[in-house]
């Protein structure tokens, strides 16, 4: 064996080692990516298995009945489902226009030096944990709401036909409306941040040509920017909805936790997530426990559907940017 | 020049909508300030050195939050220790090994959904797989829950950061004969080191305030515990329990805890933001 052969053999060995290392590294990263995929599937399967006893005992009536009685083991999800939908709708009704206004301000109105600090302030709202919103809602917002806003709402809106009953009732401070308002505050940073990014993808030439034919800023926003970004804006709103549906701690603090359905938004209620948070550790008996997991399964399926739709809509924006 | 009859109406609409947009922005910033003022106002007066030397008290007596603070550090620390490497490696796969493939697209999609999925359901899941089989709550289960929440945050940031690495750098490494793992570890990772740290910090900020998923995994513990196999006190659950209680001294402690947690999270978020912008500028 010559020296050249030995060198070549050593090189080949080194090469093989590196090839192995490459395969191993790739394998490890691939495994980690698969863990993410499997986690979602595992959550779905485990919730499904956990909710089987409830579905066997209560059938589909679980979703349509209002009763929630641990003693007789009769459980219906209608109350929490109603609470989840109502609080999320309130959150969207209040949160979407505000988010739109903030995005509009940050992209069209604010002078350059103001954009960054205000943008950061709004984004920091998203970093504050849910439980802090809950405490603030319970100890600061709810008393103020009860003493100032609720009487005002009853006086001015309570007499309206159709909508009136929504705003009648005792000014308790806590309740469905309070939960909706807190949720609105919590989803604003998410929606407005995406709307801002989306608005910035509108080509300057489109905005400028509208301005050049004499459009006002509002007309540019309403007739050029919004139509151009319609799909992504809907995606941003859906993302906010996905957040609102599943939000737990803040709602648990302020909603009052009652399973009954009332016409008034001032009355206490419950959402799916607040019911789970409040009752899960105290649930006794298989059916009770399984009913709570079934609530979780329903919430999980609804939120991942909403979030998937949101992502799909926002993807089109990402493609357009590239 | 003829007068435009619509002119006043159009300018009025513009004025009203622009005014409204400025007002809601002020409102948004005001809410942030109001929350911070409440947390600082109530929390600051409840701060005392005993907070970090005494255990959580029974109602009606003085105490601190020592066991909760330490428990939180242990559980979130473990959560990050498990979640961050998985997130970084998965993000590496997406950005370096198979960008654009269907597996990458699917993983990113699922990860983004996990990112916004209700965290309480992740708690339910871990309860089913890690609490029911062993028959008791544990700090491990809490850490596992937080790890699952941390992974998508780290994955997302890692992938975004690695995609900022110019391909020239990778090609230069390849031209020198570097195997791909070396190119990733010594070139790509090094180029966006601050960005990777950003992702971990963001995940840390995110999970240190998570309450709902800990309710039925780590539960709570009124006493000092270093047993990872048993229930462990943690700040978010203590805050929840104390704030909802009717006792004044418990509520005061809850505000003190809220102050600690908010300060930590906002500090981490701002640090992450600074790091992020330096990475982004460097890669330009």
Image (cartoon, rainbow, N blue to C red):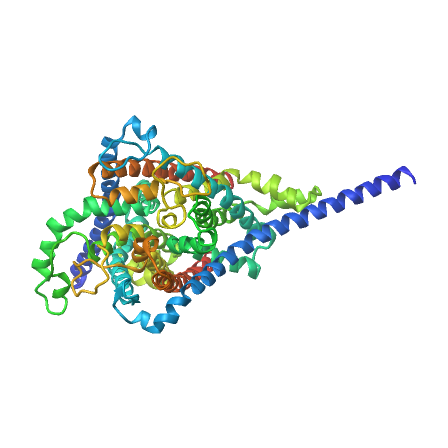
Q: How many marks?
A: 0
> Can residue A275 be seen in this snapshot?
yes
Residue nearest the viewer, comparing B277 with B190 = B190
Residue at 45 percent across and 64 percent down: it is A49
x, y percentage for residue A84?
Answer: 28, 61
Q: Is residue A261 above or below residue B191?
A: below
Residue nearest the viewer, comparing B245 with A238 = B245
Q: Quadrant of the N terminus of chain A?
A: top right
x, y percentage for residue B265?
Answer: 36, 39
x, y percentage for residue B159?
Answer: 52, 49
Residue at 9 percent across and 55 percent down: it is A152
Residue at 20 percent across and 51 percent down: it is B19
Residue at the outermost right position: A1
Q: Quadrant of residue A95?
A: bottom left
Residue at the outermost bottom position: A60
Residue nearest the viewer, comparing A264 with B213 = B213
A12 sits to left or right of A198: right
Residue at the outermost top position: B49
Residue nearest the viewer, comparing B178 with B153 = B153
A160 sits to left or right of A176: left
> Can residue B1 be seen in this snapshot?
no
């Amino acid at each position: 064996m010559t020296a050249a052969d030995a060198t070549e053999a050593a090189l080949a060995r080194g090469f093989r080692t590196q090839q192995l290392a490459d395969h191993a590294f790739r394998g490890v990263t691939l495994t980690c990516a698969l863990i993410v995929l499997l986690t979602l599937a595992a959550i779905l399967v485990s919730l499904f298995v956990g909710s089987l006893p409830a579905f066997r005992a209560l059938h589909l009536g679980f979703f349509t009945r209002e009763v929630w009685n641990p003693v007789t083991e009769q459980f219906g999800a209608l109350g929490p489902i109603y609470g989840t939908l109502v609080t999320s709708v309130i959150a969207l009704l209040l949160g979407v226009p505000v988010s739109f206004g903030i995005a509009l301000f940050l992209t069209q109105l604010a002078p350059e030096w103001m954009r960054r600090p205000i943008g950061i302030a709004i984004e920091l709202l998203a970093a504050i944990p849910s439980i802090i919103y809950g405490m603030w809602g319970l100890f600061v917002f709810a008393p103020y709401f009860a003493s100032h806003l609720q009487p005002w709402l009853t006086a001015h809106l309570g007499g309206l036909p159709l909508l009136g009953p929504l705003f009648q009732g005792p000014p308790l401070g806590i309740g469905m409306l309070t939960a909706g308002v807190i949720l609105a505050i919590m989803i604003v940073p998410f929606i407005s941040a995406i709307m801002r990014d989306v608005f910035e993808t509108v080509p300057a030439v489109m905005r400028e040509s509208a301005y050049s034919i004499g459009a006002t800023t509002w007309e540019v926003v309403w007739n050029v920017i919004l139509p151009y970004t319609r799909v992504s804006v809907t995606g941003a709103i859906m993302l906010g909805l996905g957040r609102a549906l599943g939000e737990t701690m803040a709602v648990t603090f302020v909603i009052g936790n009652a399973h009954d359905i009332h016409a008034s938004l001032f009355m206490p209620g419950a959402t799916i997530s607040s019911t789970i948070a409040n009752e899960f550790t105290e649930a006794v008996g298989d059916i009770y426990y399984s009913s709570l997991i079934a609530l979780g399964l329903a919430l999980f399926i609804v939120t991942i559907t909403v979030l998937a739709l949101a992502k799909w809509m926002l993807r089109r924006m990402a493609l357009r940017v590239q | 020049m003829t007068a435009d009859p619509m002119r006043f109406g159009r300018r009025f609409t513009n004025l009203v909508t622009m005014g409204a947009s400025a007002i809601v922005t002020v409102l948004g910033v005001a809410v942030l300030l109001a929350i911070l003022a409440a947390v600082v106002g109530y929390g600051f007066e409840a701060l005392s050195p005993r907070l970090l030397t005494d255990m959580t008290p029974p109602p009606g007596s003085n105490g601190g939050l020592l066991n909760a603070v330490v428990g939180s550090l242990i559980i979130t620390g473990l959560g990050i220790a498990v979640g961050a490497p998985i997130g970084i490696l998965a993000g590496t796969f997406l950005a370096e090994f198979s960008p654009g493939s269907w597996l990458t697209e699917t993983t990113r999609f699922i990860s983004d959904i996990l990112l916004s999925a209700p965290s309480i359901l992740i708690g339910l899941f871990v309860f089913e797989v890690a609490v029911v089989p062993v028959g008791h709550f544990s700090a491990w289960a809490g850490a596992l829950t937080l790890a699952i929440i941390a992974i998508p945050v780290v994955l997302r940031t890692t992938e975004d950061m690695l995609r900022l690495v110019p391909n020239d750098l990778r090609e230069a490494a390849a031209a020198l004969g570097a195997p791909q793992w070396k190119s990733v570890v010594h070139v790509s990772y090094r180029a966006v080191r601050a960005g990777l740290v950003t992702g971990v910090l963001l995940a840390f900020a995110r999970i240190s305030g998570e309450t709902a998923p800990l309710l039925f995994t780590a539960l709570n513990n009124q006493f000092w515990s270093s047993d990872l196999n048993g229930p462990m006190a943690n700040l978010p659950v203590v805050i929840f329990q104390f704030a909802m209680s009717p006792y004044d001294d418990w509520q005061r402690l809850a505000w003190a805890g809220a102050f600690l947690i908010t300060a930590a999270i906002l500090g981490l978020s701002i640090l992450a933001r600074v790091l992020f912008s330096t990475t982004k500028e460097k890669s330009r």
